[in-house]
């Protein structure tokens, strides 16, 4: 697959981790994306893809693209034989200035890009991207579109951004009461702002950070002592860690390791090898 990415210029870099272009044959027809402390916006330029938001749900088709606020559970992406898109990996609070609704309304409910920005505007954007030529030009065009849509007056964004930064810097190991006290607001007020701008409470975001930090630090090429992993991450016991693991990935830790090793074995050095999992 061809993958190109870059960090946007200020002030977008305070909201977005990177802009990316992706084209080619996916490593698997279906990929599972575990819950992570980030949001996602995709402008689809190829055949439609599908998303299944949680076990027991029916996959939905996305032709124009999608918006995914900070998830609390794993999503399954179903890809066509070849995929082509540009997208944005967004910080937990980063979608808020581009949404016409509170992020909580989209929690664990991916929506089409048309539902957020409107059919005519999205169709025009996709046309411009398709005629832009090189990936770098496409990313510049997407960045310009985001700059045009940026709302500078999102209430509470500074508060949520600062608190989220502390959560990230501590890998989720911070008392939420300390965050609200330091900010001079009540825990209820902080939680409300987080739900409006991130889609989840600060406690839930902290749990996701702790889980993601723990799993991404594991060397899956070596034997894994799950008890030591749980203890090192500050979980009360291994049972608590296993429960959290299943909640965020849909898999037990042992099964997750098997599937992760399969990806690394089948596709060493793949551009998508850090987080997605085979789902088939």
Image: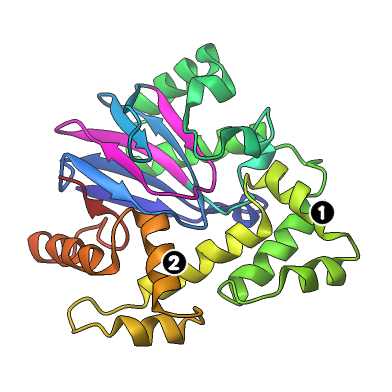
Q: Quadrant of the C terminus?
A: top left
- Residue 102 drawn in magenta: no
Instruction: Decide: few, some or many residues near mark 2? Use Cα within 10 Å; few <14, some 14-19, many ≥20.
Output: many
- Give above or below for 83 relative to 246: above
Indicate left or right for 66 with 106 as reference: left
What residue is pinned by disc 1?
A: 188
Q: Nearer the viewer, residue 272 or 249?
A: 249
Of tags 1 and 2, the one toward the viewer is: 1
Q: Residue at x 64, y 38 (%)?
A: 103
Instruction: In the rendered structure, find residue 212 and report the number of the disc placed on it.
Output: 2
Q: What's the magenta region?
A: 64-88
Single out the residue that lies furthest toward the left.
266
Indicate left or right for 87 with 273 as reference: right
Residue 45 position by quadrant: top left
Marked residue nearer the N-terminal end (1 or 2):
1
Q: Secondary structure at mark 1?
A: helix
Residue 136 position by quadrant: top left
């Amino acid at each position: 697959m061809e993958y190109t990415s870059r960090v946007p210029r200020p002030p977008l870099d305070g909201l977005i981790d990177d802009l990316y272009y992706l084209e080619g044959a996916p490593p698997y027809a279906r990929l599972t994306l575990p819950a992570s402390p980030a949001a996602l916006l995709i402008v689809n330029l190829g055949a439609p893809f599908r998303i299944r938001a949680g076990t027991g749900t029916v996959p939905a088709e996305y032709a124009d693209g999608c918006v995914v606020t900070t998830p609390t559970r794993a999503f399954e992406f179903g890809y066509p034989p070849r995929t082509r898109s540009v997208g944005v990996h967004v910080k937990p609070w980063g979608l808020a200035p581009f949404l016409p609704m509170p992020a909580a309304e989209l929690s664990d409910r991916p929506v089409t890009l048309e539902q957020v920005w409107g059919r005519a505007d999205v169709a025009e954007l996709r046309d411009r991207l398709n005629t832009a030529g090189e990936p770098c030009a496409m990313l510049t065009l997407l960045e310009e579109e985001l700059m045009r849509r940026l709302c500078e007056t999102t209430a509470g964004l500074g508060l949520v951004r600062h608190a989220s930064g502390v959560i990230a810097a501590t890998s989720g190991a911070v008392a939420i009461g300390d965050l609200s006290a330091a900010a001079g607001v009540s825990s209820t007020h902080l939680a409300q702002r987080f739900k409006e701008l991130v889609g989840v409470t600060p406690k839930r975001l902290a749990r996701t950070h702790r889980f993601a930090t723990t799993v991404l630090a594991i060397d899956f090429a070596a034997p894994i002592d799950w008890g030591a992993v749980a203890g090192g991450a500050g979980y009360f016991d291994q049972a608590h860690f296993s429960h959290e693991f299943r909640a965020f990935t849909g898999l037990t830790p042992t099964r997750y390791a098997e599937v992760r090793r399969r990806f690394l074995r089948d596709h060493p050095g793949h551009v998508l090898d850090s987080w997605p999992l085979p789902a088939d």
